[in-house]
Amino acid sequence: MENGLSKRKTPFVGSEFPEREFAELTDFLRETRGFNLEMYKDRCIKRRIATRVRALGFDNAAAYLDLLRRQPEEADILLAALSIHVSQFFRNPSTFVLLEKKVLPDLLASPAAQGRPELRLWSVGCAGGEEPYSLAILLAGLLKEGMRVRILGTDVSEAVLERARQGIFDTSRLAEVPAVLREQCFEPSKGQYRLRESFRQLVSFRHHNILADSAYPKVDLIMCRNVLIYFSREEQEKILLRFADSLPPGGVLVLGRSETLLGKSRDRFEPESLSERIYRRKASLI
């Protein structure tokens, strides 16, 4: 017996992504944007693409592929959707407390001892900029005269990076910012909040894909939280080893709560705090 339910179209989900269409989409992004989906976990990436397919009102992958070929700008929107992860200022506050009380003061002492009055930090997969700007707020209260800090935020999406450069955020992104700090660091901007210039100028943003062969910057601290979870274990280990090569002895790596060291990367780091997923690069690499 037919009824309304039997005629209703089933929403497209990632698990239904035909292999042929997924391979064609992978080829399209690699050829037009240099972005390789093959290194991501299939289930995660297909789910995110399916979200974009549904948002445009399609119920199958073929129709979306056709749109992608006819409207090249859709590739940029899709890349932004694939790279977005939920973020807010001082996400996982206990991590930032440890950074402020122990890790950053140690690092600030380190480059001075080496005769290099500059601390370099890197926020990988920085999305809207909440994480690197949180570091800027912390460091503004810790820097001593003559010390400089350079914070780099990178992401695979130019659209996301442009939004980060604006430094404008919804109230929901500031949920973990104490009222006093919100007053000191932000100014109202058309129903939102804009981080003050003195903090924004500590951070620069640029496009970077950690899966590509391009060089990793040499830095003192790397924050890469909730990014590795989208990659295969093999790719995660490669990235962790490259992080180790980018850090000096004693340099710091901060991962997400559901991420950890894998394979040979365990020989390159020692834990600073296992609960906060903070590790230091060993003085001598094995």
Image: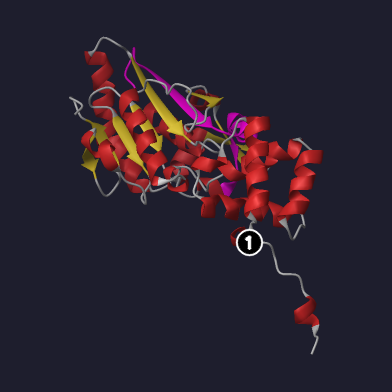
Q: Residue sitting at 51 percent across and 22 percent down?
A: 201
Q: In this rendering, does residue 90 appear at all?
A: no
Residue 81 in the figure: left or right of residue 232 = right
* Left or right, 130 with reference to 159: left
Q: Position of residue 72 (x, y in %)?
A: 76, 35
The span shown in magenta is 142-171
Q: Is residue 6 left or right of residue 88?
A: right
Q: Residue 98 location in percent, x, y?
A: 28, 40
Q: Secondary structure at mark 1?
A: helix
Image position, residue 247 (x, y; %): 31, 25
Quadrant of the rendered image containing residue 100? top left
Residue for badge 1: 16
* Residue 43 visible in rendering: yes
Residue 220 on image: x %, y %: 33, 24
Q: Indicate whether 119 appears above or below 171.
A: above
Total labels: the figure holds 1
- Would you place residue 139 above or below residue 57 in this image? above
Image point (73%, 58%), residue name = 60
Location of residue 84 by image quarter: top right
Label 1 crowd (10 A; few <14 / some 14-19 / many >=20): few
Dividing the image into 4 quarters, which one contains the N terminus?
bottom right
Q: Nearer the viewer, residue 49 or 98?
A: 49
**Residue 170 among magenta residues:** yes
Q: Nearer the viewer, residue 91 or 271?
A: 271
- Single out the residue that lies furthest toward the top: 115
Q: Quadrant location of the C terminus?
A: top left
* Amino acid found under the numbered disc labelled 1: Glu
Q: State the residue lying farthest toward the front.
A: 20
Q: Which scheme is used to colour this image of the protein?
A: secondary structure
